[in-house]
Image (tube, grey):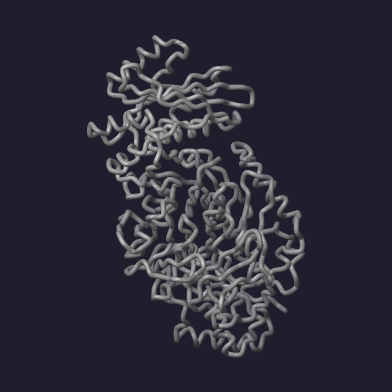
Amino acid sequence: MMRPGRPLGFLVGLVLLAALGGALSSPPAARSQAADVLLNVLATGAKKLNIVIPHFTVVGGPDAQGLGKGLSQVTARDLTFSSLFSVVSDVPAIPPGDPAAVRAAFANFASAGAHAGLQGVLTLRGDRAELEMRLHDLTSPEFRLIGAKKIELPATQTRRLAHKVADEVVLQFTGEAGVADTKVAYVNSGSGSKELSLMDYDGASAARVTSNNSINLSPVWSPDTRSLAFTSYMRGYPYLYRMFPFENRPVQVLAGFLGINTSPAFSPDGKSVALTLSRDGNPEVYVLNLASGAFRRLTTYSGIDTEPSWSPTGREIAFVSERAGGAHVFVMDAEGANVRRLTQAGFNTQPRWSPKGDTIVFTSRQGNFDLWAIGPDGSNLRRLTAGPGNNEGASWAPNGRHLVFQSNRLAGGYQLFTMLADGSEQQPLTRAPGESTSASWSPRLP
Amino acid sequence: MAHRRGSALLVAPVLVLSLFLAGCPKRPATTAASAPPPTGAPSSAAPSTGGETRGGAMTPTPLAPATAAPSTTPPAPSEFRETDNLKDVFFDFDKYDIRAADAKMLDSNAAWLKTNDNLVLIEGHCDERGTNEYNLALGERRAKATMNYLVGQGVQANRITIISYGKERPTCTEHSEACWAKNRRAHFLVKAR
């Protein structure tokens, strides 16, 4: 259903790293034509690439829902969110199959400063929908085609088509796909109890996925995006469960020991879950092997050890311990050995290891709660938020460039916000009813 | 892969929960029924040596119906009742040691428990500051410290069950130290044997 993408630019990744300070990877691949466009644009000193996204054209049926306009604007918002593009949208669709009209439109956009143009053609075929994207270099005299792809999904998921097109555009220009086709799992109290909900990464399509009227906490995605592990009081005591929100499968108990069964984190290979159990008398970090059901205890301290977070290699685990007095972030090998302390001052919890491996974000209490970042070797400690209110519970986007977190900076309690990994571009994601907390940003959907 | 979103998203959880209620374990040999005997007996104070353990491990299988739980499972929290005879004790911020004034309260609670043969549920609670996960651990430590004190006063450990609610069930919802101090507590419920 998808054509293979074009090879992407090594050089572009480097340029973006330099120009945007981002955590983009730079895979050694052949340079793409899209990459050349970006190179040329950034060479002029521009920080972002100007892209124009006319309304998509709809064929194969009437566009009763206004999908041509609506989906183009979803893609436009995705590319704006990426912070890599300056987007012009809400432009009338370019008539397909009319080369002269296309050329005239592109000439207009180019003279207005656009570097790239994105065309989309949405084809409706009964219960399927296909979106074809065509990416043009408007800096070249012939407005050459630098990327094309057809994506097909069930007709009920047209919004995901728009997200996938945005992710493809980011891939073409940077060498790594965008993060628009992702979900955020979180806890919402709008029903009167804390229930798990899912939404698109941009806040759309929010839907509750538990309704047990107890307390549900700490949802985390499995790497394959098929399941969530979470703590629930649905059976009275805080047990750890796993649910499959997109499948007709029963909820599983992952851990139901006396005491707490909390703070789950899937290993990067999806085969294990790190968690906190107090079955041995106090909260300790364990690893559950999902295939065998065996639990392996990693920590041995008489007070609190909790909140494990895997490194992307699966070889190390960050966690919180009060073994040094107060709460601090530590790192250990995935077998529990070689424990070293990362944080020195403050009261530090919620370590979340970046998918790129080079950064651990955590929540620090120094007066209020704010988000900080530190290298896994303890270097490069920096503050990401400085109020207003408390800012806690960060979760990484799969590209390591964005974070979702909770803040009570606005009246009415906690809501979710997003920001870039350096703390810039903070913006609200959720709003009432209810408070929204404990966000987990999914890996890219298949 | 069977990733269906949109309307399926709303339907799937209902199916999941209805299956959960019906209880349809694929591997009934290892379900909630095989949880370690949660007798409420105090665990060894010394940390275990780690290593692989399988005994009583909850394997990732479907949830069994509650009726399948063995008799060693503690009664559900909802089976315990409030009592005026056992007084709450309170804790300092991020602490779980029993304060001197509260020790006297616990002495009196212990005395009542020794003459009234009830089961007791000790809830550990925290104030609203900090993360869910850390507060669940902290509430656990508070309930455990309270339990250990009572056991030290001669209350049988197998009468006591603990539960941590972290910061999830505050008694006071204002954002002030006066309110937070009321929420950092161990609370007692009882159930007739």
Picture residue at 31% right of the left edge, 21% below the top:
A140
Picture residue at 57% right of the left edge, 57% below the top:
A230
Vertical arrangement, residue B84 with respect to residue A181, above or below: below
Residue A375 appears in which quarter of the rendering?
bottom left
Locate the N terminus of chain A and report the quarter of the image it occupies: top right
Q: Is residue A223 visible?
A: yes
- Foreground of the two, A2 or A131: A2
- Foreground of the two, A412 or A173: A173
Residue at the far left in the pictured view: A45
Where residue B11 appears, x then y in whole percent? 66, 42
On screen, residue A400 versus residue B155, left or right, reads left
Where residue A357 appears, x then y in whole percent? 41, 54
Locate the C terminus of chain A and report the quarter of the image it occupies: top right
Where residue A348 appears, x then y in whole percent? 38, 65
Where residue B153 appears, x then y in whole percent? 57, 90
On screen, residue B126 versus residue A137, left or right, reads right
Q: Is residue A78 visible?
A: no
Picture residue at 43% right of the left edge, 45% below the top:
A399
